[in-house]
Image: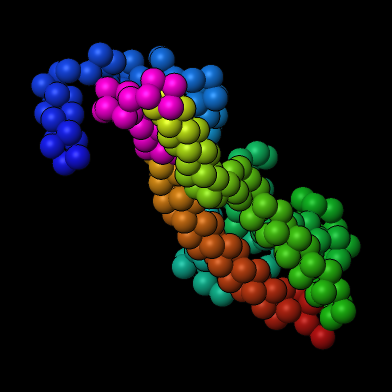
Amino acid sequence: MRQVIFANLVSLAAGGSSKSLDPFELIRNASPVVMLVLAVLAGMSLASWFIIGAKIVRLGQASRHSEAFLDQFWDPQLGNVWSVQRMERLYATLPREGRAPVASVFHAGYVELARVLGGSDESARSQRHYGGDIDNVARALRRSAANEVTSLESMVPFLATTGSTAPFVGLFGTVWGIMNSFISIGAQKNASLDVVAPGIAEALIATAIGLAAAIPAVMAYNFFMRRINVLSSEMENFSSDYLNIVRRHFLAG
């Protein structure tokens, strides 16, 4: 038996197989089920790479813009002197669209503070004392921060889905390919590598593509969630600092 197996291996290595083991040729000649599996995996991989590219740009911009806004907010030349006019100037410099996450939180806090103080969004006229209204400002900050985190996390769960399901989709293609190999063995009553090798190779291609789709998706998901957690912490810390400023300088009492 060992001699037969060894002879088959030698024959295959010498090019004795009548069927090509070229990966692209195997994919073209794959069964419809395996082709469907490969198409699904290719779609998941392309979607994952699109999300990865979009999130790299989005999170990079969010980090840079948040850092720039915090530098402006904590202007060392102005120190710890806070007034309605200073808040108005900060609010006036905010872009209408594409704001940094921290800037969006400030926007929500300022609008609520202006309402409490009895002014408009652009002009809060006087500093009045409403100790109970600090809760309204806090709720506005929390709501804005939650909305920003939701926006930052959009499409990221798809990467986790790809990472967890793509290997199993590829495994399904592998099982199907192996099953077809055994069917070929039974039909031809021949267990030589000429019969077995193409089906096994076809099956392993499905597994390889499944892993190729899953591994980058999992790595990107972990990387993005870490970046999002950092931005979420920045918004939480800013909210706490903003509330302290409001308590001390605007709503004391």
Looking at the image, residue 172 lies above or below residue 10? below
Residue at position x 86%, y 74% from top? 133
**Which quarter shows the C terminus?**
bottom right
Near-viewer residue (135 or 250): 135
Q: Which residues, given as a range, are shown in magenta?
A: 186-210
Q: State whether the magenta stretch is mostly helix, strand or loop.
A: helix
Side of 75 where 197 appears, left or right: left
Percent x, y for residue 64? Answer: 46, 50
Farthest bottom residue in view: 253
Residue at position x 15%, y 18% from top? 15
Percent x, y for residue 139? Answer: 79, 67
Looking at the image, residue 50 lies above or below residue 252? above
Residue at position x 52%, y 72% from top? 79
The image quadrant of residue 7 is: top left
Q: Is residue 56 in view from this perspective?
A: no
**Which quarter shows the N terminus?**
top left
Side of 107 where 156 appears, left or right: left
Residue at position x 52%, y 44% from top? 168
Side of 22 where 139 appears, left or right: right
Looking at the image, residue 102 lies above or below residue 12? below
